Image (cartoon, rainbow, N blue to C red):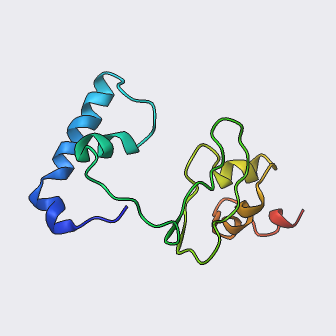
Amino acid sequence: MVIDLDRWRDGDYTTKIEEWMELQKRMRIYELGSLPPFLLVFAGNIVPVDHRWNQHGLGGDNYRGLCRDLHPGPVSLLHWSGKGKPWARLDANRPCPLDALWAPYDLLQSPFALDS
C-alpha cells in the first residue's frame, strides 16, 4: 500500500478506519484480516500496485495451502499475504521453497537449525 500522507491527513482516514475497527470489535462484520477496514473506507477509490514492486501471494493458496513461485522479473517487496506464513511453515518443518528467503530474519531460530 502506498499512501499520500497529505491526503490521508486531510481526509482524516485514521479516524475513519479506527471507527470500522471499533465496530468489528463490538460485532464481527468481516473475516478477512486487516484489509476490510481500508476497503470500506476507500470504497473502490484505489489502484493496484504493480506486481514488479510488490510480490504478493507468497502465503500460498488459502484453500489448499499450495506454495507459489515469484512473478517473473525483479521485485522490491516480498509479501507473504494469505494464511501461509513462513515462520509457521518453518517451525512446522513444512516450508515452501521461498520461505528460505525469510529464514535469516527469524529472530527465534538459530541459524544452525535451518541446516538440519
Give the residue at x 25% y 43%.
Answer: 43
Q: Residue furthest top?
A: 27
Q: State the residue at coordinates (70%, 61%).
A: 69
The residue located at (40%, 43%) in the rendering is: 34
Image quarter where the C terminus lies is: bottom right
Which residue occupies the extreme right position in the image? 116
> Is residue 20 toward the left or the right of residue 54 in the image?
left
**Residue drawn where x is 76% and y is 69% of the image:** 111
Q: Quadrant of residue 61?
A: top right
Q: Position of residue 9 (x, y in %)?
A: 14, 60
Q: Which residue occupies the foreground of this view, 107 or 83?
A: 83
The residue at the far left in this view is: 10
Q: Position of residue 47 (x, y in %)?
A: 34, 59
> Would you place residue 5 above or below residue 36 in this image?
below
Q: If the image is split into quadrants, where does the N terminus sit? A: bottom left
In the image, is 112 to the left or to the right of 61? right
Exactly how many numbered labels are in the figure? 0
Q: Nearer the viewer, residue 39 or 21?
A: 39
- Asked if 76 appears above or below 79 in the picture, the reply is below
The percent coordinates of residue 115 (x first, y second) are: 87, 67
Position of 16 with respect to 44 (left or right) is left
Nearer to us in this view, 2 or 14: 2
> Quick check: 19 left or right of 113?
left
Q: Position of residue 99 (x, y in %)?
A: 71, 60
